[in-house]
Amino acid sequence: MKKILVENSKKYEVTVGFDLLITAGDSVKSVCGGEKVAIISDDNVYPLYGEILTDNLKKSGYSVF
């Protein structure tokens, strides 16, 4: 896993690595908290990764839209 610092109008980190979708729910919860999350995707990416991301977010207690 690698973290890249993006410096724009605001600074933030982007995490790049293998199997991050499997831990996405816990990662989002530790950074953002909350109870609801929306997945923004397109017709090419969602069929590849949407189901595993949705399932993992739900396992972490999120309502997923």
Image (spheres, rainbow, N blue to C red):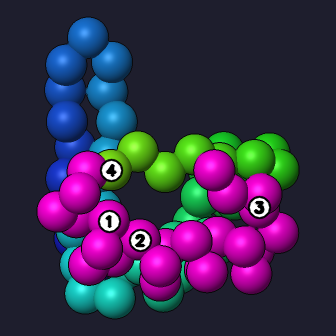
Q: Position of residue 3 (x, y in %)?
A: 26, 61
**Magenta span:** 42-65
Q: Residue 6, labelled with which disc? A: none
Cα separation, mark 3 vs mark 1, equals 18 Å
The residue carrying pointer 4 sits among few (fewer than 14), some (14 to 19) or many (20 or more) residues within 10 Å by Cα, namely: few
State if disc 2 and disc 1 touch (CB < 8 Å): yes
Residue nearest the viewer, comparing 48 with 24: 48
| Residue at 77%, 61% in the rendered image | 62
Kind of residue at badge 1: Tyr
Residue that label 2 marks: 50
| Residue at 26%, 78% in the rendered image | 48
Of the residues under marks 2 and 3, which one precedes in the sequence?
2
| Callout 4: SS | loop
Of the residues under marks 3 and 4, which one precedes in the sequence?
4
The residue carrying pointer 2 sits among few (fewer than 14), some (14 to 19) or many (20 or more) residues within 10 Å by Cα, namely: some
State if disc 4 and disc 3 touch (CB < 8 Å): no
Q: Position of residue 58 (x, y in %)?
A: 72, 73
| Callout in the foreground (3, 1) | 1
Q: Note whether 38 is above or below 22 in the view shown.
A: above
Of the residues under marks 1 and 4, which one precedes in the sequence?
4
Residue 56 falls inside the magenta stretch:
yes
| Callout 1: SS | helix
Residue that label 4 marks: 41
| Residue at 32%, 65% in the rendered image | 46
State if disc 3 and disc 2 touch (CB < 8 Å): no
Residue that label 1 marks: 46
State if disc 4 and disc 1 touch (CB < 8 Å): yes
Residue that label 3 marks: 62
Kind of residue at badge 4: Ser
Residue 30 falls inside the magenta stretch:
no
Which quadrant of the figure has residue 43?
bottom left
